[in-house]
Image: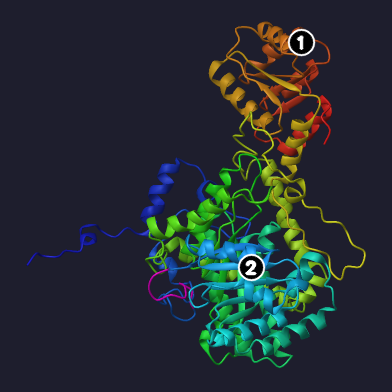
Amino acid sequence: MAETRKLFEDFPPVTRQEWMDKIIADLKGADFNKKLVWRPAEGFEVWPFYMKEDLDGVPLNDVAPGEYPWVRGGRRSGNDWLVRQEIMVNDYTGANRKAKWLTERGVNSFGFVLCNPQSVSHDNIATLINGIDPERVEINFVPEGRAIELAESLIRISAERGMHPSAFNGAIETDPLGRLMINGRLCIPLNEGLDYLASLFRAASPLGKLRLVKVNASLFSDAGSDTVQELAFGLSMGNEYVAALASRGISIDTAFSRIKFGFGTGSNYFFEIAKLRAARMLWSVIAGKWETQDKDSARMCIHSRTTRWNKTLFDPWVNMLRTQTEAMSAVLGGADSLTVEPFDTVFREPQEFSERIARNQQLLLKEEAYFSKVADPGGGSYYIGQLTGKLAESAWKLFVETENRGGFLSALKDGFIQQKIKETASARRKNIAASREVLTGTTRYPLPEEGIPDGFSAARAFPEHPVQADTEVEPLITARGAEEIEKLRIAALNSERKPVIFLLPAGNPVMAMARSQFSSNFFACGGYNITVNPLFETVGEGVKKAVAAKASVIVLCSSDDDYPSLATELVQAAPSGTILVIAGNPPSAEELKKLGIKYFISIRSDLAETIRMFHKLTGVTD
């Protein structure tokens, strides 16, 4: 019999101090904390390495997958999440036909968005789910109203099919608090809406597997929140629902067991994995405070959806890369179901091709990457374990602060939640404008010849949020981080005037071409016509070609040392009225300004503000 050996016994253990000594030596005098310790918007420090002992302080980290409090997911083995696709229901027969077609293509969860509440009737609901087996496919309804009538129809349909109502698996996704938050008001007083919700719980009691409330925490991420805010305010909203239902006679266990959470998943890969783990941990803590009798009732049911904040309309194929990593995060974090939105959904009605790609992104993870085969694939990662603990701790502090203000509804009414998210969204927009948060294809590496996408809808890409006088609360504004720069680029593309940006590299060839490449990318983000050139022997030669090209703007690209002499030549040779720009932020900037050069672009420039300035200078109107 072959001898078995533990290979790690051949390697001596390495202490934290030994790691630190090696890192400090490699830094060659640079400050460790400034160089390698990351301080994200969530407000805590992230180290470049972690060790096993770092998990000792993380609560509930040693439980197994599928065990209370479900930090490591709700499955003991495997990770087979549900592949969900939303279907807008205007035509019930057509929606049914599409759903059955999709079941043959890997979809096993549907989100039927019932656009017209007046159309909800027994016959229409029966038509919608005709031929769909509720024991094999999860059926979720997103109603705008008449939720009780919907529940009664499902009970009646189960009788007509000769099955128990508990065979239906999925949700009737009511969310009056979410609608109040987005719209600023409800069509009925909120107390009446919560009374109606309690009545729905009673009417739908035979439908034992259906969740009846969806906490749409994804609205926070779509508005630009960070992961801590999405967690804390989502948990607070869930807690508000439990309190409202309990005060209306619904048992605590029933309330917990029939709430579903919806989280948005962004591109911060490991944070998004840890966010779902932290969410389950904290929801179990909240359930413990409510003294639920059945621990299983407190297991958080999570539907993840790829977020819209970071999606773009230019170079939209990059959205596929974004949604792929987001889908991976949701799956590794233990989501029960997942919607990958089509790459073009933020700027046009999704095409059949984009819907198919979105479905296949999940199927690739299941069938080819085997993400469905292992429970909690992130288990044992010191980094993910640490992030789980840090996110949970930070989110709990914000949750408690919200509760101390009277709970979610009170915090919403006094504007606390909206203000917190507005501050974060504003900071993120500034980071995007300053290229600290990169949106590939939009704020960096744009496709120079790209036009406005086919089927573009301004109403879809840039939805308006008119201020209404009779709102109960300040609406939470959902938006995308790229909207401002996209509008500027569209203005240039639609402008009757087509300003030409002429790049004039001269002097030091390495710096000249590097800054020429930077300038090309910078101005292409604004939708300009860019004339890219090889290195010129003299500035005068470049100016002659710029005049022939009818350039509105000449960008001198060179080294800091060369700028004083080359800029003097540029000012002397350039025609009057030509806008002269220096690529970079040289030490001689003040000297250059005295020569008459007013404009500089660099990695420190605010992209949106700078492009807006050049729009005004060149006659482009928004």
Disc 2 is placed on an element classified as: strand
**Residue at the spot x=74%, y=57% of the render?**
423
Residue 476 position by quadrant: bottom right
Does residue 74 belong to the magenta stretch?
Answer: yes
Q: Is residue 310 above or below residue 337?
A: above
Pick whichever, 124 or 41, lies toward us: 124
Q: Position of residue 509 (x, y in %)?
A: 55, 16
Pick whichever, 499 or 10, lies toward us: 499
Q: Position of residue 383 (x, y in %)?
A: 45, 61
Disc 1 is placed on an element classified as: loop
Pick whichever, 249 or 431, lies toward us: 249
Residue with the mark numbered 2: 112
Q: Is residue 418 above or below residue 450?
A: below
Residue 144 position by quadrant: bottom right
Residue at far right of view: 469
The residue carrying pointer 2 sits among few (fewer than 14), some (14 to 19) or many (20 or more) residues within 10 Å by Cα, namely: many
Q: Amino acid at mark 2?
A: Phe
User: Which callout, 1 or 2, points at the residue further toward the start of the chain?
Assistant: 2
- Label 1 and label 2: CA atoms lie apart by 62 Å
Q: Which label lies toward us, 1 or 2?
A: 2
Q: Position of residue 409 (x, y in %)?
A: 77, 76
Q: Magenta residues: mostly which secondary structure?
A: loop
Residue with the mark numbered 1: 574
Q: Amino acid at mark 1?
A: Ala
State how the image is colored.
rainbow
The residue carrying pointer 1 sits among few (fewer than 14), some (14 to 19) or many (20 or more) residues within 10 Å by Cα, namely: some
Marker count (numbered)? 2
Pick whichever, 351 or 399, lies toward us: 351
**Residue at the spot x=67%, y=85% of the render?**
152
Q: In the image, which residues are magenta?
A: 70-79
- Looking at the image, residue 263 sits to the left or right of residue 401; the answer is left
